[in-house]
Amino acid sequence: MLRRLPLALALLVAACATQPVSAPRTGYQPQTTAHLTGAVAVNPMDYRPRTGVAPQGSVRDVPGYVTNALKAELRRAGAGLNSSRCILDATIRDFKVDRAGAEEHYGVDIRYELAVGGNVQFDQAFGTTFTVARGQSVDRAVDDAIAKNLNFLLKDDWFATLLLRECSGRA
């Protein structure tokens, strides 16, 4: 019996090695054209989807991936990520795909809260949809849907004003 164990283990490992496993996503590319002045700390996002099927593609950790995407977009917009005064929290309330006919509709709904000195100064939810023809890469469609939602935050006048006025060291 013990002599057959290494052979059985080798066959099991060989069988598992032939199954394709997609790698976790690490390559979100920021897309924003917003310009921000200020610095903010970004807490890890909560994930509390209300409906739908998450179109995660090869994204394994939805809140971690979207949090990192937000940080990348903030950096691209010119914001720092090293504030102890300004803290950005967010909750992903929906992250879904609806497939209907020849189209796929991706939905992202995120609530953002910016606290300045411990007091919430910005509390806004943005629900966005992104429609693509069936057959487009799920990973690309997910990234585009995330970018569209994050861009609503980054281009929000009140968010940008708070960042400049309260989070930049400029009075």
Image (spheres, rainbow, N blue to C red):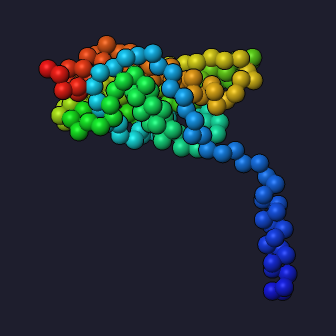
Q: Indicate left or right for 93 with 81 as reference.
A: right
Q: Tell me what residue is drawn at x 24 percent, y 20 percent.
A: 164
The single residue placed furthest to the left in the displayed view is 171
Q: Quadrant of residue 82?
A: top left
Quadrant containing the N terminus in the rendered view: bottom right
Q: Quadrant of residue 120?
A: top left
Task: Give the image location of residue 114, x and y in percent.
Answer: 28, 29
Q: Is residue 88 above or below residue 9?
A: above
Task: Give the image location of residue 137, x and y in percent.
Answer: 70, 27
Q: Quadrant of residue 24?
A: top right
Q: Is residue 44 above or below residue 145?
A: below
Q: Is residue 168 above or below residue 33?
A: below
Q: Nearer the viewer, residue 53 or 170?
A: 170
Q: Tell me what residue is drawn at x 57 percent, y 23 percent.
A: 144
Q: Tell me what residue is drawn at x 78 percent, y 65 percent.
A: 13
Q: Is residue 75 above or below residue 103?
A: below
Q: Tell me what residue is drawn at x 85 percent, y 75 percent.
A: 7
Q: Nearer the viewer, residue 86 or 89?
A: 86
Quadrant containing the C terminus in the rendered view: top left
Q: How many marks?
A: 0
Task: Give the image location of residue 34, x and y in percent.
Answer: 41, 16
The single residue placed furthest to the top in the displayed view is 157
